[in-house]
């Protein structure tokens, strides 16, 4: 590896979650990394922003340009990705006390991102909180709690036959269902139809499973994909507490992204923010940055699609099929109150459930040590909840969709993403208007208007993997991430691992002497790591390994 100051093995454009995880892994492996971003902040499309930063983000992507030809390639791509932007004209006071995520997400307690957080040591840099409730809304019954464990099933008022059918399905969904007789020939069947025909579940149970456990967005979501998400949900339950999901502090993924960038920097990664690539060329890539004295050179390039310099890849097109998702970020004065949890003696009305018991005090729950939010006694009335997800199935809201579901994610002061007494409500809906759902949230919280509101439409690929085909090694394009609330985090980690392994293969080919241990036993740090571990993404950390256990369905 060259010793010149501007010479690197890899240049990474964009500090989104995929690029940041890859940068941390490559730097820890001994690869010399330069990490560049057009933005003055970390995180790209997964950034966590203060309210004033969020307002500037919206204005820069919606303000008319006097000369479109002067727009940078990045900003032009962003304006195509984010459209129909409108926001409140006044930014509230104390705007810097907010940390709002551009990509609201839940982190499954078992999965690729948790593994990367603990194996890389990034978990030490942030805080996490258990998701307190998942609720489902219906016109006739209002907001109801969704079961979080098999204990909730047994405490419910379902008939014995209904409980047996539901438990049979949950055991099936938590196991290795691929190739099973129940699934054979139904992989592409609409998930609601699969549940009704194969497990004879009631409409109430179907809605809860499809939209609140498997996080499907429509009545046509296929069975195989939905079962994969549901299995992640079930296997994550009980690892850190009652909830299968964690919520990151300070906006979630944006803060986690900064943690991976910190690991990269500690291991030699060089960071250059708020600089626009002006030219790039050559077999050994030479990149010139605006208002930066020296060019950067590298053997390999990784880039978010909208941050890749056009001169590096003139034939790159963005004509993949897109879907539109309406998003709203609303700040209100109150959280959404949930129905009280019922004790096992009380039982449940149909549609409600109590969360599983939290981990007992002193029990080892692993390195993340998220804050538990369980209560020892159920409150007597509706309880304001600091972290929650509310699902609006099709036909659940007047003026809403008959085929699509909407999701509202609440974070408050407990996640350090809003000041005391304020809550953020990111809302996503795969159609044109979020107004009926926002009005329902305001009604549930008993407030008339949000303190601040931002509405926009995000255009995402129909297939998150559709951008992988435009790679031209040694240029690698980060795949688009799925819009699912519970899937984006793990998808990013899996994509980063794939990029990491492919880049290592390229570097081994270009410099085999660097990546192969010599017969004398002397080699670079990277050579030592990969001679010993072969393919693992992270070198082992000191200390005991984290418990991988979860609830046994």
Image (cartoon, rainbow, N blue to C red):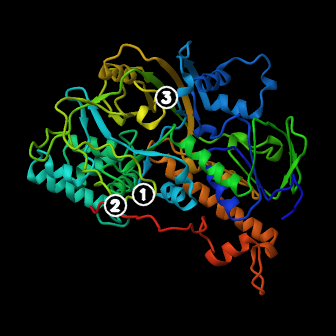
> Is disc 1 surrounded by few (<14), some (14 to 19) or many (20+) residues within 10 Å?
many
Judging by the rendered image, the residue that carries numbered circle 2 is: 550
Judge whether residue 17 can be spotted in this image: no
> Comparing marks 2 and 3, which lies closer to the viewer?
2
The disc, 2 or 3, on the residue closer to the chain's N-terminal end is 3
Q: Are marks 3 and 1 in contact (CB under 8 Å)?
A: no
Query: Judging from the image, what secondary structure is the residue with disc 1 in?
Result: loop
Q: Which quadrant does the N terminus fall into?
A: bottom right
Judging by the rendered image, the residue that carries numbered circle 3 is: 326
Task: Look at the picture and state if 138 lies above or below 36.
Answer: above
Q: Are marks 2 and 3 in contact (CB under 8 Å)?
A: no
> Comparing marks 3 and 1, which lies closer to the viewer?
1
Disc 2 to disc 3, C-alpha distance: 35 Å
Task: Place residue 474 in its image quadrant.
Answer: bottom right
Residue 494 in percent (x, y) is at 55, 57
Task: Look at the picture and state if 199 lies above or below 552.
Answer: above
Judging by the rendered image, the residue that carries numbered circle 1 is: 110
Nearest to the observer: residue 410 or residue 368: 368
Question: Which residue corresponds to the image point at 23% horizontal and 48% vertical from the top-left?
Answer: 196
The disc, 3 or 1, on the residue closer to the chain's N-terminal end is 1
Residue 365 in percent (x, y) is at 38, 58
Disc 3 to disc 1, C-alpha distance: 29 Å
Query: Judging from the image, what secondary structure is the residue with disc 2 in?
Result: loop
Question: Which residue corresponds to the image point at 14% horizontal and 41% vertical from the top-left?
Answer: 348
The count of marks equals 3
Question: Which residue corresponds to the image point at 68% horizontal and 40% vertical from the top-left?
Answer: 318
Question: Which residue corresponds to the image point at 28% horizontal and 44% vertical from the top-left?
Answer: 374
Query: Judging from the image, what secondary structure is the residue with disc 3 in?
Result: strand
């Amino acid at each position: 590896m060259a010793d010149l100051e501007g010479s690197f093995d890899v240049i990474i454009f964009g500090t989104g979650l995929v690029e940041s995880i890859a940068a941390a892994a490559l730097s820890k492996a001994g690869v010399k990394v330069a990490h560049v971003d057009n933005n003055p902040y970390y995180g790209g499309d997964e950034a966590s922003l203060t309210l004033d930063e969020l307002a500037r983000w919206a204005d820069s992507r919606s303000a008319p340009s006097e000369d479109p030809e002067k727009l940078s390639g990045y900003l032009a791509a962003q304006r195509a990705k984010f459209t129909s932007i409108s926001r409140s004209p006044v930014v509230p006071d104390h705007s810097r006390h907010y940390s709002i995520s551009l990509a609201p997400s839940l982190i499954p307690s078992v999965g690729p991102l948790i593994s990367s957080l603990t194996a890389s040591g990034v978990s030490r840099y942030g805080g996490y909180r258990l998701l307190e409730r998942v609720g489902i809304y219906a016109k006739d019954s209002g907001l109801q709690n969704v079961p979080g464990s098999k204990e909730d099933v047994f405490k419910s008022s379902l008939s014995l036959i209904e409980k047996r059918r539901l438990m049979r399905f949950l055991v099936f969904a938590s196991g290795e269902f691929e190739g099973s007789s129940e699934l054979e020939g139904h992989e592409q069947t609409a998930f609601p139809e699969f549940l009704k025909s194969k497990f004879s579940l009631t409409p109430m149970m179907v809605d809860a499973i499809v939209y609140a456990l498997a996080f499907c967005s429509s009545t046509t979501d296929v069975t195989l994909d939905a079962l994969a998400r549901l299995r992640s949900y079930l296997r994550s339950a009980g690892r850190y507490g009652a909830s299968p999901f964690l919520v990151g502090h300070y906006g979630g993924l944006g803060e986690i992204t900064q943690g991976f960038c910190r690991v990269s920097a500690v291991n030699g990664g060089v960071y250059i923010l708020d600089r626009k690539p002006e030219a790039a060329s050559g077999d050994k890539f030479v990149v010139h940055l605006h208002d930066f004295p020296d060019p950067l050179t590298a053997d390999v390039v990784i880039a978010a699609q909208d941050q890749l310099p056009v001169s590096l890849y003139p034939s790159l097109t963005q004509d993949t099929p897109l879907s539109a998702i309406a998003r709203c970020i609303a700040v209100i004065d109150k959280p959404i109150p949930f129905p009280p949890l019922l004790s096992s003696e009380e039982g449940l009305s149909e549609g409600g459930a109590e969360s599983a018991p939290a981990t007992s005090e002193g029990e080892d729950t692993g390195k993340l040590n998220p804050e538990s939010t369980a209560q020892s006694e159920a409150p007597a009335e509706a309880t304001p909840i600091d972290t929650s997800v509310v699902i609006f199935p099709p036909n659940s809201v007047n003026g809403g969709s008959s085929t699509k579901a909407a999701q509202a994610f609440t974070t408050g002061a407990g996640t350090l993403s809003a000041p005391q007494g304020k809550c953020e409500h990111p809302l996503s809906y795969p159609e044109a208007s979020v107004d009926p759902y926002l009005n329902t949230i305001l009604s549930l919280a008993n407030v008339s208007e949000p303190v601040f509101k931002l509405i926009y439409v995000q255009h995402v690929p129909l297939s998150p993997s559709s951008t992988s085909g435009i790679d031209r090694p040694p240029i690698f394009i980060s795949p688009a991430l799925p819009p699912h609330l519970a899937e984006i985090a793990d998808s990013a980690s899996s994509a980063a691992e794939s990029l990491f392994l492919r880049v290592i293969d390229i570097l081994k080919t270009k410099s085999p002497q660097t990546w192969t241990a010599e017969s004398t036993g002397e080699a670079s740090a990277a050579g030592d790591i990969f001679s010993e571990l072969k393919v693992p993404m992270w070198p082992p950390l000191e200390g005991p390994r984290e418990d991988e256990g979860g609830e046994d369905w």
